[in-house]
Every structure is written in structure tokens, then in C-alpha cells.
Amino acid sequence: MFYNQKLAIKNTHGYQLSAISYQPFRIVFPAKNNLRKIHFVILLFICFFSLTACKSANQTAQTEVKMRDIADDLGRKIKIPEKVERVVSLAPNLTENIFAIGAGDRLVGVTTFCNYPEDAQKIQKVGDTMNPNMETIIALKPQIVFVSTASQIETFTKTLEANNITVFVTNPKDLNGVLTNLRQLGEIFGTPERTTILLNELFERIAAVDEQVRDQPKTKTFVQISKEPLFTIGKESFLTEIVERAGGISVTKDVATAYPKISKETALAFNPDVLILSESPDNTEPNDVFKNSSAVKNKKVFKVNADILSRPSPRIVDALEQIAEDLHPQTNDN
């Protein structure tokens, strides 16, 4: 009936249409239904892959933000990533330490004073130790910023933490503290094997110095950090122990703070037998107050490179060995 009606109408206009030629008109609606089904199936696939991608992204994000707890030298409980890949060092000794334990390639920023090892000079500079450039540090996107003193932390910790950057403070008080820091850095960066080899070597060298100066008389020693004004080491400096381990005794070991400025009258009263100069361009000679001291009269004035002497890093053992030789040269005859 359907075809007859349609054909009748068409015939009144002179069209010669057959039922077969008109068949496409009957499948228009089923074709639309099929297209809707196809669209629905495609939508299901899109949703499935989107959910899968989101799940994968979430799993990746969870892996990236997986954290662990650790304490720094101030006793602060902080969180650091399981895998540390990008860090900034704001102290030359920390830069040396990070390289020494095999993680120098993780440093993305260092200070202008970080000159050792040589590869440290190729790393992006972020300002000096006490006045780092916060914008540069944040732009480098480090996971951790390492600082060496508590005085640094108060000025910019909040800014860094607001950008999800952890601040880790090291503050070694003695030789054992230096070694402990190295071990902890090995744990932070996941380089325990390299760190163990380094520590074993340092322990052996320290033990050799202990044996070298055993039973030797303690030599009265003054460490001159700067000539003018006259700065030295005090009871809070790790160098006080270094002098003692090398077979001497620091005449300023009971002076308050780590690096006190002292008057010439006080220095004159010490009358040291040995002078150790932290050698730098402005500290190559003893202060004039020592011109009549036993050290100067007996030509017991020795120089140790300031970088080696002042940085609590593996090279402090170099300083220990050098001072031991200066104080007790006769023990090396055999």
C-alpha cells in the first residue's frame, strides 16, 4: 500500500520510479539509528580511555609525590621525596659533599662561592650564600634546598615551602658531624655504596693521623682566620677539634662562639707556639700583635688554604693531615 500510494503520486508528475529505486527512502531512519549506535560506542571508548589515562596520571602523580620523613641538624622533622633528583646548594661545603657522595649531577643551582670541584663552576648560580636569589631558585624547581647555618633559614624558608621546596639545614660541630652529614646525604640521594667507600677512606686517614700524633705533646696553637680585624676560632667551631686531633691545642678553645673577633691585647696574652693562617688574599701574614710571639720567633707560622680549612667537607681531612705534619714534622721521618 505504501509503495502504491507513493508511486501513484509520483506517476501523476510523470516520474518513472519503481519500488526498488525508492528503497533508499525506507532505510533513512534505520541508518540514523545505526549512526547513533556508532556514536554511542565511540563515546564509550573515549570514556574508557579517558578514565584509564586519568588513572595512569594519578598513579604517576602519586609516585612523584611519595615522601619520606627525615631530620636535619636542627632537629626539624621534614619531608623529602623518595627519589631526589633536583636540589640547590647554598654553601660551598655542601656542594663539595654532594659531589663527593656521587650526586653532583642532581645539583641544579649553587652559590657564586661554590668553586670545587671544577664541575661545580658549570652549574647555574643563584647568588651568594647569605643573599640567594629567591626567584632564580624557585624557577629551577628544586625539591630540596640545602643550607649550612640556621641563620639562613629564617629569611626564606616560608617562601620556599610555599613553592613546595623543602629546606634542609646542616650544622656540623666537629669532625664526626662532618662524617655524619656525608652519611646522611648518601641516604638522601640514594648513593650508599659510593658514600660507604668515601667514609671508609676518610676513617682510615683520620686513624692514621691519630696514630701519628699519639703520645706527642700538645702544641699551643692560634688559628688566624683574618688578619684585620683579628678573627680566630672559638669553642663552637669544628676547627677547634681539628687542631686537637692534629696534635695541638687551640689557645682560644674556651672563647665563646665559633669565630670570635678578639682584641690585640687578648691575642698578645695567648703567646702561641704555632700560628696557623687560613690562607686567603688578605690573610697571608700574622697580625702584628704576634711579632714577638714564640711562633714568629721560632718560625712556626704555617698556611692552610682557606677553602680547605674552612669547609666542613671531605677536604677537611686534608687540612687535618697538613696541620699534623706542621705541628709534629719529626713523626714523619720514618
Image: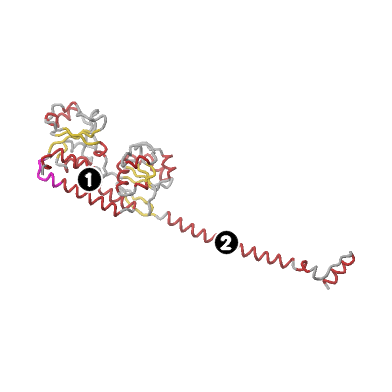
Quadrant assignment, res 82: bottom left
Q: How many marks?
A: 2
Question: Which of the two residues, 271 or 195, is positioned nearer the viewer here?
Answer: 195
Quadrant assignment, res 325: top left
Q: Residues within 10 Å of mark 1 (few under 14, many from 20)?
A: many
Q: Is residue 166 visible?
A: no
**Distance Cα–Cα, label 2 vs label 1:** 61 Å
Q: Is residue 58 left or right of residue 190?
A: right
Which amino acid, by three-letter code, is at mark 1? Leu
Up/down of 210 relative to 260, above or below = below
Quarter of the image with the C terminus in it:
top left
> Which residue position is annotated with label 2?
47
Q: Residues within 10 Å of mark 2 (few under 14, many from 20)?
A: few
> Which residue position is annotated with label 1?
175
Residue numbers of the magenta segment: 210-217
Residue located 42% across and 40% down the image: 136
Residue located 71% across and 65% down the image: 32
Which amino acid, by three-letter code, is at mark 2? Cys
Q: Which mark is residue 318?
A: none
Quarter of the image with the N terminus in it:
bottom right
Q: Is residue 210 left or right of residue 307?
A: left
Q: Is residue 322 left or right of residue 23?
A: left
Q: Tell me the SS state at disc 1.
A: helix
Give the x, y percent position of residue 225.
23, 33
214 falls in the magenta region? yes
Give the x, y percent position of residue 249.
15, 39
The reply to whether dot 2 and dot 1 touch (C-beta < 8 Å) is: no
| Colour option used | secondary structure
Question: Which of the two residues, 154 or 56, is positioned nearer the viewer here?
Answer: 56
Q: Tell me the SS state at disc 2.
A: helix
Quadrant assignment, res 122: top left
